[in-house]
Image: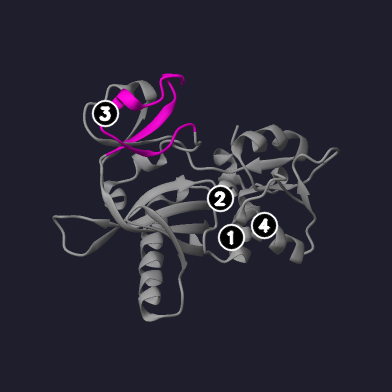
Amino acid sequence: MLVMPGRRTSTMELLAAEAAGRGMPVRAAEEPGLTGPAYWYGGPVAGARLAGRLGFALLEPTDGWLAELPEEFTGRQVRAATLADAWALDRPTFVKPPRDKSFPAEVHGDGSRLPADLDPATPVLLSEVVTFAAEYRLFLLDGRIAAASRYAVFGRLDPRPLGPDREDRSTAAQLAEFADRLTAAAGPTLPSAVVVDVGQLLDPYRPGHRWAVVEANMAWFSHAYAADPARVLDVVLRSAGPREHVRPRDAAFERR
């Protein structure tokens, strides 16, 4: 059984249709009397509330994963900090919550406009400001790309599937090569089913584009954009399925 909020996004509709096509019942989280075992696609608050009753485990990357990556993969300096640290910023910095959406991820000229009503100990990631020419969402399963889609160009939402033309084949090959290097170096620090966003980083000191990690996210709460929903569902089901199916290597990534 796949459970998701009754008020569905476009990704939820696609995944619900794919799940139903596989013979899986699809139920609304608000439906009374639901019992497990179940799979989940939806937000972290509702997911955490339902996980115990419906018996699913939510896999997610750790808060500090991006900050712990070598700069070879980030292409910029990223550090884990707290909101109190961010309030003290005196230069332009990209500030984002590691996982939740407690405030928008964006560039701040200093710390004065960051939310003042949150716990000062709230984790944040602080990154030097860079420009991504294009950004791609990779749904990774066992360290390999199961599905992928472009989702932004120069920071503006612009989803596009990776098609059969020469340019897309080249991009797909570059993405696969970068993902292979990333998972070879940092694969054990990610759950077996996860989303990693990567982009073509514009570097004024290097000609051409350079691939870099934008961030990592939980697959069970990530928009599919133009990726193949069947392959996306494969990753979602691994990332938020019955607790008894969690593999030993993934136990450390279960949301508590």
Q: Does dot 2 land on a helix, a strand or a loop?
A: helix
Label for residue 232?
A: 1
Circle 2: is it few (<14), some (14-19), or many (20+) Cα within 10 Å? many
Location of residue 2 in the rendering, given as x and y in whole percent from the top left corner = 73, 51
The disc placed on residue 219 is 2
Say which residue appears at 39% left-offset and 31% top-offset.
124
Residue plotted at (39% across, 65% down): 175
Q: Nearer the viewer, mark 4 or mark 1?
A: 4
Is 39 within the magenta? no
Identify residue type, mark 4: Glu
Element marked by disc 3: loop
Sequence order check: which comes first, mark 1 or mark 3?
Answer: 3
Return the residue at label 4: 13
Which is more foreground, mark 1 or mark 3?
A: 3
Earlier residue among tags 4 and 1: 4
Tell me the kind of residue under disc 1. Answer: Val
Q: Which of the marked residues, 3 or 2, is nearer the chain's N terminus?
A: 3
Of tags 4 and 2, the one toward the viewer is: 4
| Segment colored magenta | 102-127
- Badge 1 or badge 2: first in the primary sequence: 2
Q: Amino acid at mark 3?
A: Asp
* Tags 1 and 2 touching, CB below 8 Å: yes
